[in-house]
Image: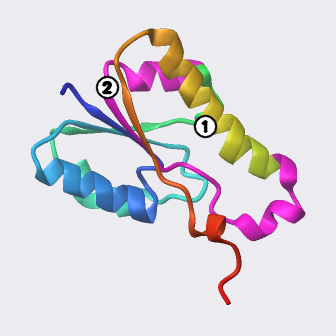
């Protein structure tokens, strides 16, 4: 496996996943627009020569394609985590959650290379806890 691509790498879960992948000796490309993530979460990863961080947005398909390169495995964790704001800003939620995922899938489809994608959703899919 050439490299693993992690979207939302500077987020809480993305940064922990990145550290775990690096500790296994894998090459990791972290991709994040830093709208909710924080580079401080990647302090350990940034010191690892097998890690490359790209500040970019999945809404930019050219930047996404370039950063994805030859990665054969994608962990897609990028999203706007503020679900409650969706009622006030549905356009923003649509762009950051649905359009961004669609763009990533289109980039993968267009490159015609075997790729595995792991998609992590949120606890919101379960509805309100009783």
Q: Nearer the viewer, residue 24 or 36?
A: 24
Q: Locate the N terminus by quadrant.
A: top left
Q: Which mark is residue 43?
A: none
In the image as oriented, which residue stretches furthest toward the right?
Answer: 88
Q: Are marks 2 and 1 in contact (CB under 8 Å)?
A: no
Choose the circle earlier in sequence order: 2 or 1.
2
- The reply to whether residue 128 is visible in this rendering is yes
**How busy is the neighbourhood of tag 1: few (under 14 within 10 Å), some, or many (20 plus)?**
many
Q: Residue at x 55, y 29 (%)?
A: 104
User: Based on the displayed image, in which of its 4 quarters is residue 6 positioned?
Assistant: top left
Q: Secondary structure at mark 2?
A: loop
Work out which residue is located at the far bottom of the displayed protein and give it: 130
Query: Does residue 105 appear left or right of residue 71 in this picture?
Result: right
Residue 129 is inside the magenta segment: no
Provide residue 103's location: percent of width, then percent of height: 62, 28
User: In this rendering, would 81 be left or right of 84?
Assistant: left
Q: Quadrant of residue 81?
A: bottom right
Residue 27, percent across and down?
A: 20, 36
Q: Is residue 119 or residue 62 the one in the foreground?
A: 119
Residue 126: image location, x then y, percent: 63, 70
From mark 2 to mark 1, how far is it between C-alphas? 17 Å
| Residue at image point 65% right, 84% down | 129
Say which mark, if any, is on residue 71.
2
Whether residue 86 appears in magenta in the rendering, the answer is: yes
Q: Which residue is mark 1?
A: 101
Residue 40 visible, this angle: no
| Viewport quadrant of the C terminus | bottom right
Which range is magenta?
62-91
């Amino acid at each position: 496996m050439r490299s693993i691509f992690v979207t939302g790498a500077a987020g809480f879960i993305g940064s922990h996943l990145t550290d775990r992948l690096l500790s296994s000796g894998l090459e990791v490309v972290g991709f994040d627009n830093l709208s909710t993530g924080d580079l401080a979460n990647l302090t350990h990863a940034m010191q690892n020569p097998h890690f490359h961080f790209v500040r970019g947005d999945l809404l930019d398909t050219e930047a996404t394609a370039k950063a994805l390169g030859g990665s054969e495995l994608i962990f897609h964790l990028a999203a706007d985590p503020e679900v409650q704001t969706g009622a006030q800003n549905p356009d923003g939620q649509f762009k950051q959650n649905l359009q961004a995922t669609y763009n990533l899938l289109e980039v993968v489809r267009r490159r015609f290379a075997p790729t595995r994608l792991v998609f992590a959703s949120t606890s919101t899919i379960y509805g309100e806890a009783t």
